[in-house]
Structure formats: C-alpha cells, structure tokens
Image (cartoon, rainbow, N blue to C red):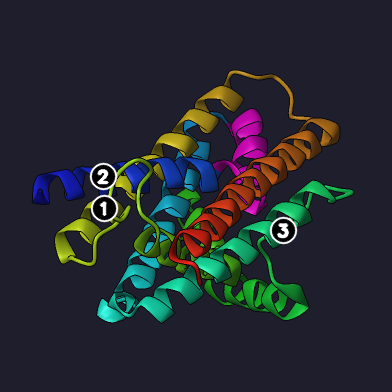
Amino acid sequence: MEPQSILLAALAGFVTALIFSSIPVGPINLTVINEGARRGFKWAMLIGIGAATMEVIYCSIAFAGFSSFFDRHLVEAAMKVFTFVFLLFLGSRFLTAKKVAATTEFGSKAEQLEGRIEGKLHPHSAFAIGFVRVMGNVGVLLTWLVIAAYLMSHEAYFTDQYWVADTFAAKAACVVGVALGTNAWFCGLSFGMSRRHGRFGEKTLLRMQHFSGICLIAVALFDGAHIVWQLARHKL
C-alpha cells in the first residue's frame, strides 16, 4: 500500500504543479513569454527554473506545516470547506478579470514587499530573476498552503486514500512531483515562446485567464457537491 500512496502523491504533485504553474497568467509566466520571444530559449528556461526552485521551496514549507491534526475529523471538514471557498473565490476572480494581472498577489502591501525584495537583492542572472520574483510573491506561498491542505484532506477519486498521505515519504514524493511539473511547464513555455517571433496579445492572455477561472470554479463546484453528498450520507 505504501508504494501506491507514494505514486499517488507524486502524480498529484505533478498534475497540480502543471495546473497552478500555467494559471494564472502572472508575473513569472509573462516574464518567460516576453523573454523567450526576445532573448531566446536558454534565458527564458533559466528564469523558469529559478521560479520553479522557489515554488518547490514554498511547497515544502506548506507540507511541513501540516501534520497529524488532519486525523481530527472536525479540522479535516473545516479544511474541505475552506479550500472549496478559496477555489470558488480564486476562480471567480480569474473569470471576471478585465485585464491581465498578477492575480495571486494579495493587495498593495504584497506588491510593496515584492518590489522591496527585488530592490534589495538586485537579481541580474536569469535564474535569480525567476527565483526572486517568486520569493517576493506572498500569494504563491498562500496558494501552496491551500493546495497542501486540499491534497491532505481530500480522498483521491474512486479510492479510499488521500491524495497525499500524512507520511514523510508521501509528502516528499509530492514535492518531487511538483518539481517535475513546474520545470516541465516552464521549459515547455520557454521552448514554445522562443520559437515565436512575437508575443501573446492581451486578448489571448485574458482568454487564458478566463479559462483558468472556469476550470477552478468547476473543481470547486465538484468539491461542493461532494461535501453535500457526504453530509447527506452521514445525515449531518
């Protein structure tokens, strides 16, 4: 059973990383798109690798922050409701966006923090640019906290196992999956944009953001229906 839970956690990490690296069209994706078209594949790929490295660090921090308290059913139920509300909120925000923006940033203070970190560290290499931009984005850490809570409090579809079991091996496998997923996305994006002679237009990026919102709302509604079904089954 242990190898199965490790494989499931790695798969969950990989797929989740692919999804949340590609959405929303935030500062890192925009940087990779623009730099890939302007300076080529290698430069854009190094920005993406730097960003992926910091994402993996934030992901590790998020999973380290959750432990066996998920054994308590009340806490687990509360986290399910919280992640449902968060996904619904985030999806609605993407869907109603009027312009392309870094929608995972949380207000002016978060933007000031990001600018202050970049100003102090003065990243010059491509890797450092990607690394520092994710480091300064508080929304990335908060997003991974929610994702970690979701994966550890929800059972995988058609199984009786959680997406990520509360074991070191499963968490480590999920982090490895996240590393592979984020790097795969940024490398693919860098390669694609280095082969283009122009940049994505504002309308195209906005459509991608709206589609991201629809996907997140669909996931939230599915989870909401599952919560209602569980309540009805247990007559709570």
Residue at 85% across, 33% down: 203
Q: Is residue 105 left or right of residue 191?
A: right
**Image marks 1 and 2: residues in contact by CB distance under 8 Å:** yes
From the viewer's side, name the closer residue of 127 and 151. Answer: 151
Residue at 66% across, 61% down: 104
Residue under numbered circle 2? 8
Q: Is residue 24 left or right of residue 60?
A: right
Residue 183: in magenta span: no
Expressed as whole percent of the image width and height from the top left, the position of residue 189 reads: 54, 31
Residue 140 found in image quarter: bottom right
**Image marks 3 and 2: residues in contact by CB distance under 8 Å:** no
From the viewer's side, name the closer residue of 180 and 38. Answer: 180
Reading the chain from its start, which is encountered first: label 3 or label 1?
Answer: 3
Start-end of magenta stretch:
22-39
From the viewer's side, name the closer residue of 194 and 202. Answer: 202
Q: Decide: few, some or many residues near mark 3? Use Cα within 10 Å; few <14, some 14-19, many ≥20.
A: some
Residue at 45% across, 33% down: 187
Residue under numbered circle 3? 103
Residue under numbered circle 1? 161
Q: Real-space Cα distance between discs 3 and 2?
A: 29 Å
Q: Decide: few, some or many residues near mark 1? Use Cα within 10 Å; few <14, some 14-19, many ≥20.
A: some
Position of residue 87 relative to residue 73, above or below, is above
Expressed as whole percent of the image width and height from the top left, the position of residue 144 reads: 47, 63
